[in-house]
């Protein structure tokens, strides 16, 4: 990766970029051009391309110029001023770009406003570089599909191995950050749901500090989203970056290992690498408690109603309901895979949509019983039991985050989770990480301990940590991607 005005841009941090822009050796417009060069570089010599970005913001240069003018007048809006970022294509931007969830069905539609999180980032001076690709409709439309694929965006591919599942549904957001195409990106944790009870926006970044800067910009109460009012009085004055710590903060911490709940599902290679990292954490003064298990191990109705509400506010489109989307996919099956077996990316067609359609959005007694059961079994009868082990309140649960049950349970509970890179698989060259799980409103604790572990990774000299992409399989073009 080429330098940017003498600065090493690969793996650069937000603090390093702010120092360069503050000293005058770099400005936002030059930084933007360097990232555009990087995007074009990876697109030009890689075939197939990463397809991390579905659309570049045509106003990005003008915005960067305006932000540079603000800086020249000593008006800097914080650590994100002039920092390029991406948003997943299911996060609305009221500008010249399309917001389509990867589907041609919404091409040309006009959103009524910026999503709250995007408006917050613009107010913080961050520079919207574009929209990231995703699994179409955030994994909701099909049960058998190629992760990271959308009709409009094509197949997003991991820079570690372009032939295998890149993870999703926020595939493009993760790929772009991993490949150094932007500083940070927003994704959504949906657990394949598109549900008002589960969906949460989160940040992708290469360091915990950079992720915390982005979180500080986006958290808050959205007056159009009643669920966000629950955070009133539960978020810290002054934001989350103040909780960033060095490895010394691990002294006296107590972490739980829910072995039977999660660890048994990780392969031996992953277990060995993560346990080696946990030994480092123990060496820094933390206590590890094994056997902190979860005692017990609704969304399709929500999607039917939530998508109707969203579509009602769009302009310049005839798509107003899930029925309209299903019909569009059937009418355009060649591109949208509306029928099983037509598109290799959507082997089961749109069976996820059809299951949601069958509910007609009816929130009956069975729906509310299922919702209550899911929340109870993942919250007070799940993660909270594991975190309150005996008479001890644990600092966090340490889990192999590539095991799907970890983030699925966190999403269903509505509890936060953070993942730190740890190593690469010898078999696939794909990265895997160590996850930290905690209870509701524990983001400050997670940032404290995640940043402490990350600092330990940096300062101990261990090989266990973030690794640059390997670009394995860059000559392949397989769709669907392999689930290895």
Image (spheres, helix red, strand yellow):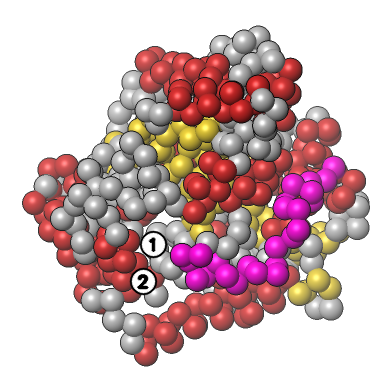
Residue picked out by circle 2: 302
N-terminal of the two: label 2 or label 1?
1
**Which residue does the image show at 49% across and 82% down from the upper left?**
373
Secondary structure at badge 2 equals: helix
User: What type of secondary structure mainly makes up the magenta span?
Assistant: loop
CB under 8 Å between callouts 2 and 1? yes
Report the Cα–Cα distance between label 2 and label 1: 7 Å
Which disc is residue 447 wearing? none
Residue placed furthest toward the bottom: 365
Secondary structure at badge 1 equals: loop
* Front residue (pair 116, 257): 116
Residue picked out by circle 1: 194
Q: Is residue 459 left or right of residue 169?
A: right
**Which residue does the image show at 59% across and 31% down from the upper left?**
83
User: Residue 239 location, x and y as percent?
Assistant: 72, 53
Q: Is residue 349 left or right of residue 480?
A: left
User: Residue 58 location, x and y as percent?
Assistant: 37, 28
Which region is colored magenta? 223-246
Q: Residue 64, can we see it?
A: yes
Q: Is residue 224 magenta?
A: yes
Q: How many marks?
A: 2
Location of residue 415 (image quadrant) = bottom right
Q: Quadrant of the N terminus?
A: top right
Neighbor class of circle 2 (other Cα within 10 Å; few <14, some 14-19, many 20+) is many
């Amino acid at each position: 990766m080429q330098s940017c005005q003498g600065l090493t841009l690969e793996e650069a941090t937000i603090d390093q970029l702010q120092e360069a822009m503050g000293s005058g050796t770099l400005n936002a417009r030059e930084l933007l051009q360097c990232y555009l060069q990087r995007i074009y570089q990876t697109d030009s010599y890689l075939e197939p391309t990463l397809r991390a970005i579905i659309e570049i913001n045509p106003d990005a240069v003008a915005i960067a110029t305006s932000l540079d003018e603000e800086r020249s007048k000593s008006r800097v809006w914080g650590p994100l001023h002039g920092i390029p970022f991406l948003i997943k294509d299911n996060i609305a931007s009221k500008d010249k770009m399309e917001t389509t969830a990867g589907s041609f069905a919404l091409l040309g539609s006009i959103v009524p406003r910026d999503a709250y999180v995007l408006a917050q980032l613009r107010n913080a001076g961050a520079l919207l570089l574009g929209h990231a690709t995703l699994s179409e409709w955030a994994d909701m439309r099909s049960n058998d599909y190629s992760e990271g694929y959308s009709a409009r965006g094509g197949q997003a591919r991991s820079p570690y191995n372009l032939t295998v599942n890149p993870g999703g549904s926020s595939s493009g957001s993760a790929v772009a950050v991993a490949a150094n195409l932007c500083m940070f990106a927003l994704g959504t944790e949906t657990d394949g749901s598109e549900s008002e009870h589960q969906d949460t926006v989160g940040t992708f970044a290469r360091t915990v500090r950079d992720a915390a800067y982005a979180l500080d910009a986006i958290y808050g109460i959205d007056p159009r989203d009643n669920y966000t009012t629950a955070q009133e009085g539960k978020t810290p004055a002054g934001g989350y970056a103040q909780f960033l710590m060095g490895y010394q903060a691990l002294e006296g911490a107590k972490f739980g290992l829910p072995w039977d709940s999660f660890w048994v599902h990780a392969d031996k290679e992953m277990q060995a690498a993560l346990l080696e990292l946990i030994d480092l954490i123990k060496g820094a003064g933390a206590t590890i408690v094994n056997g902190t298990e979860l005692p017990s191990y609704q969304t399709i109705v929500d999607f039917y109603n939530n998508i109707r509400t969203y579509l009602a506010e769009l302009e310049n489109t005839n798509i107003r309901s899930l029925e309209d989307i299903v019909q569009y996919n059937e009418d355009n099956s060649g591109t949208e895979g509306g029928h099983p077996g037509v598109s290799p990316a959507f082997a089961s067609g749109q069976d996820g949509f059809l299951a949601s359609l069958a509910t007609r959005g009816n929130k009956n007694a069975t729906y509310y019983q299922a919702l209550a059961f899911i929340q109870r079994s993942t919250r007070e009868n799940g993660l909270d039991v594991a975190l309150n082990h005996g008479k001890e309140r644990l600092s966090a649960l340490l889990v192999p985050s590539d095991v799907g049950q970890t983030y699925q349970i966190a999403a269903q509970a509505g509890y936060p989770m953070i993942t730190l890179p740890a190593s690469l698989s010898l078999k696939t060259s794909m990265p895997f990480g160590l996850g930290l799980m905690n209870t509701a409103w524990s983001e400050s604790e997670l940032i404290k301990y995640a940043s402490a572990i990350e600092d330990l990774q940096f300062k101990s000299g261990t090989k266990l940590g973030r690794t640059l992409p390997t670009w394995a399989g860059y000559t392949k073009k397989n769709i669907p991607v392999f689930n290895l």
